[in-house]
């Protein structure tokens, strides 16, 4: 069975943007591939943060993932810092990665601009990312079209290391391929930018239904639909795109007709969306509550996941060290 690896930042509770954009897809893939899903807390410390907050966000992310359907009996779910081989392999990869290649990364340039003092970890972030993937010799990484180039550096690291320490006929690390997945770019309720916690335009995956409605009610729609009698253009409306994610196809079709003929107002439309969202989100909230009520579950599941991941990670690292003349 081919192996896949994917990581997610410990940003606390999932919002529907990262649920629809990545995690729902992981749930679908976890039984088709040997899957490793990692909460990448080492990646989260390259910018200023509060330790107690990071611990809580890591736990909340684990709860969200489990509630969303990540099943530890079908895949390996773990926290990066519980498997120290990630940083050890990253150091090794630092020794084969040219500085210029890291400095050219767009993400580094953007993030560095926003900070007074830039940590080296921010620059070498993609090297740790390569170590995350290659430690498990993952064949594929689930990505959307827009992220394919991010994977190129990991492929490049694998090539460079193989050239130095393995042979062309028997490369040690596979070059991980993108597993193109139908990821959704979910816009925030402001309709201006991608849904993101930092922009305050999110709907939490575990949010109380009352609060979700309070956010949906004033959410931005087709700006040209000023009066109730103005026909709208569903394709330009974020609410319509959320219908596509949550409502059954027949409802989506009905929304398009009702909108473009001014058959109903935006509040009617949002009420239907709210009901569709509840069908999907209510069981997730319930699972999250059950997990939270059982104080041991999360810790035990993450420890078991880390032990499984570590067995493979230690084997890879042992072979790497042997090939490199390290002890
Ligand atoms: S009716 Fe629905 S799809 Fe049309 S503009 Fe209003 S909220 Fe958007």
Image (cartoon, rainbow, N blue to C red):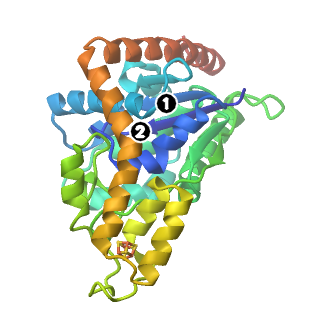
- Residue at 26% over, 22% down: 292
- Indicate whether 299 appears above or below 273: above
Question: Dot 2 corresponds to which residue?
Answer: 8
| Quadrant position of the C terminus in the picture | top right
Question: In this image, 213 relative to 172: left or right?
Answer: left
Q: Gap in Å between the C-alphas at discs 1 and 2?
A: 8 Å
Viewer-side residue, 277 vs 312: 277
Relative to residue 6, is residue 174 drawn left or right? right
Residue 276 locus on image (x, y percent):
40, 52
Please tell me which residue lies in front, 92 or 63. 63
Query: Looking at the image, can residue 70 be seen?
Result: yes
In what element is the residue under mark 2? strand
Q: Indicate the quadrant where residue 61 lies.
A: top left
* Residue carrying label 1: 37
Seen at 54% across and 28% down, the residue is 36
Residue 325 appears anywhere in the view? no
User: Is disc 1 placed on a helix, strand or loop?
Assistant: strand
Ligand 1 quadrant assignment: bottom left
Looking at marks 1 and 2 on the same chain, the residue that comes earlier in the sequence is marked by 2
Location of the N terminus by quadrant is: top right
Residue at x 27%, y 14% (from the top left corner): 294
Percent coordinates x, y for residue 249 in the rendering: 56, 59
Whole-percent x, y for residue 82 in the image:
38, 18
Residue 215: name its quadrant. Answer: bottom left
Q: Answer above or below: position of 94 versus 113.
A: above
State the count of labels: 2
């Amino acid at each position: 069975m081919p192996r896949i690896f994917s990581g997610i930042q410990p940003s606390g509770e999932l919002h529907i943007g990262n649920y629809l954009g990545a995690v729902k897809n992981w749930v679908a893939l976890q039984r088709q591939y040997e899957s490793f899903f990692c909460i990448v807390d080492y990646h989260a410390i390259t910018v200023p943060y509060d330790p107690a907050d990071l611990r809580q966000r890591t736990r909340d992310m684990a709860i969200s993932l489990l509630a969303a359907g990540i099943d530890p009996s079908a895949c390996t779910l773990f926290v990066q810092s519980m498997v120290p081989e990630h940083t050890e392999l990253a150091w090794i990869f630092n020794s084969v990665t040219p500085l210029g290649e890291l400095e050219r990364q767009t993400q580094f340039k953007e993030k560095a601009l926003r900070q007074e003092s830039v940590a080296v970890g921010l620059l070498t972030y993609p090297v740790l990312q390569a170590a995350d993937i290659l430690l498990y010799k993952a064949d594929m990484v689930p990505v959307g079209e827009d992220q394919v180039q991010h994977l190129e550096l990991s492929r490049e690291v694998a090539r460079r290391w193989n050239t130095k320490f393995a042979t062309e006929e028997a490369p040690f690390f596979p070059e991980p391929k993108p597993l193109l997945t139908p990821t959704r770019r979910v816009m925030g309720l402001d309709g201006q930018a991608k849904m993101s916690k930092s922009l305050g335009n999110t709907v939490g995956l575990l949010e109380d239904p009352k609060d979700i409605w309070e956010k949906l009610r004033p959410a931005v729609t087709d700006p040209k639909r000023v009066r109730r009698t103005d026909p709208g253009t569903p394709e330009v409306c974020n609410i319509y795109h959320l219908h596509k994610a949550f409502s059954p196809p027949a409802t989506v079709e009905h929304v398009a007709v009702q909108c473009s003929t001014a058959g109903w107002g935006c509040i009617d439309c949002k009420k239907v969306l709210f009901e569709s969202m509840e069908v999907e989100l209510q069981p997730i909230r319930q699972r999250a509550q059950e997990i939270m009520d059982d104080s041991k579950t999360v810790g035990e599941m993450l420890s078991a996941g880390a032990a499984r991941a570590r067995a493979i990670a230690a084997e890879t690292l042992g072979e790497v060290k042997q090939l490199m003349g390290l002890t």
